[in-house]
Amino acid sequence: MSAAMDTIREAAAASVPKPQARHGEVLLAVENVSLRFGGVKAINDVSFDIRKGEVRAIIGPNGAGKTSMLNCINGFYHPQEGRIAYRGVTRARMRPHQAAAAGIARTFQNVALFKGMSTLDNIMTGRTLKMKRGFFWQALRFGPAMTEEIAHRKVVEDIIDFLQIQHIRKLPVGKLPYGLQKRVELGRALAMEPELLLLDEPMAGMNLEEKEDMCRFILDVNQQFGTTIALIEHDMGVVMDLSDRVVVLEYGRKIADGTPDEVKRDQKVIDAYLGVAH
Amino acid sequence: MSDVAVRPSTPLLANAWIKAGLIIAGIAAAALVGARLDPTGTVHKVLVDPFVQMADMPDLFVQTIWEGLVSGVLYALIALGFVLIFKASGVFNFAQGIMVVFAALTLVGLYEKGVPAFLAVILTLGVMFVLAFTIERVVLRPLVNQPDIILFMATFGITYFLIGFGESLFGGNPKQMITEQLWLPRGALEFEVLGGRLMLQKIDIAAAVIASLMIAALALFFQYTRIGRALRAVADSHKAALSVGISLNQIWVIVWFAAGNVALITGIMWGARSDVSFALEIVALKALPVLILGGFTSIPGAIVGGLIIGIGEKLGEFYWGPLIGGGIESWLAYFIALGFLLFRPQGLFGDKIIERI
């Protein structure tokens, strides 16, 4: 990409001992997962793992089943076959709010924000599971509930500072430009203090400058907070720069899995992206 | 010549308010001309005479407005129950009307069985909670992700179940609301206003005050608490709400319970003005035109819509009703709603639906 990107890469290389991160223990294991919609097989017998502290990219041509995979991981879809183990625990039918409670946060391909609410409120919703005061105190908005609200507000303000979106704190997010909406959505996911962060095309539809900002935020999150990240992205430059390991899907099947360099040289991957004469 | 001269002006007619103003001015002008030409004809009777009456007897006019205001507040309360549930779950809850009756019947029924009045209120709230919980578990949860029409039909089922269940528990006879036991005032206040008498029922004043307090409390709750934020989040986007760990099931129980509370207050207030019977359900249908006017997703819309419908139908009944032999009140609201559907289908405050093609 650009000079800015290079410095980021250098900074990343300097500050974090990457190989160590790569050999972290398995955080999430996907084993022989298949997902069907009626007769259509969206995912077909896919297995891979995500290790603690790494940035894992999922790539593939359109319709390869990447988003379906994320939806399985955070409980929107329930695969018919195979199992998904998170922190070594398999749950038969993980529901989205259970996934969230277990520390899995995500963003969406076509930004899913609460459009009528302000940036601040949107990010505050990310604290939902951290706030424990019951209905009664909530209703009175008094005593413990008040103290709690203030404490969480502090965390949210820190996230807003981190993402440099102070100037839009009070604006309804529906009116913000797309790039900023994506940033607010990332902020909401961060407010959950997740262990595993799923990003579905975090840079889709952004211009170069916005992409560089977003890359920096993702790397910072990974390095400063040690958050494990799984991301779907189409921009190959970004994928190669950011990720420790890449899994490649095509027509619902896994065709390659490895470091960016290995994947880049894989003949099947090249065929999938460039087409092959039959 | 200069740059300023070429700046295109925005067409005046593009502004809806200017357009509406022009139409009203046009009608007024036509009325005056028509009335001049034919002082005893229909035009005069419809467009001029009622206003002359209003000006001649301002005390009666104010009285009529007050009556309209009070029934408007109660319509707004019923509509509020609909909006709560529609916003959070996208379900048009046909059963809201019967929930009003059911709550009021439970309250009176418990009192008749010897429970002290205020304890009966608390127990009724408990019953509404159990109802909300059961509806979520038995009806909504199995039907999640079904088309809207199926959920709508399911609320019809709930309606008829509640009618039958309520009748078998409490009998089908109209009951007297326990107003005194709940310390609600009786009697009327009289004022000398504008050279006439203005009579305000104390219960009506209480209804307006209590309804306003409740709406304010709900608004604060929605705006400033975690659960309120979660409710607004669910209303905006189900999948995003799920992804931050908001449990839809829990939220649904809460909104149905909130709607149940609103139903109970409405039931008490309405029951105090007439009596508690299943006929109230028909009145509850008035919430439909209110919602069409105010927009299905807007709480301020429900309030303003309720007041417009309430006042509109009382004025219509009193000043224009005699022209066609009365009975306007029962259908005027729907007629106004029909007009709104033609010109502003999203209502006054509703979300405009713009779909990408």
Image (spheres, coloured by chain):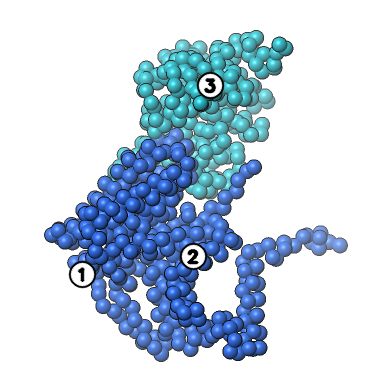
Chain colours: A cyan, B blue
**Do we see residue A252 in this rendering?**
yes
Between marks 3 and 1, how big is the CA–CA gap?
67 Å
The residue that disc 2 covers is: B334
Amino acid type, residue under disc 3 in the picture: Lys
The residue that disc 3 covers is: A41
- B4 displayed left or right of B95: right
How far across and down, in percent of the image, does residue A148 sit?
A: 33, 42
Of all chains, the one bearing label 1 is B
Q: Tell which residue pokes out farthest to the left in this image.
A: B114
Of all chains, the one bearing label 3 is A
- A211 displayed left or right of A28: right
- A224 displayed left or right of B102: right
Q: Does dot 2 land on a helix, a strand or a loop?
A: helix
| The label number, if any, that marks residue B180 in the structure image | 1
| The label number, if any, that marks residue B355 in the structure image | none
**Do we see residue B320 in this rendering?**
no
Give a yes or no on whether discs 2 and 3 share a subunit.
no
Of all chains, the one bearing label 2 is B
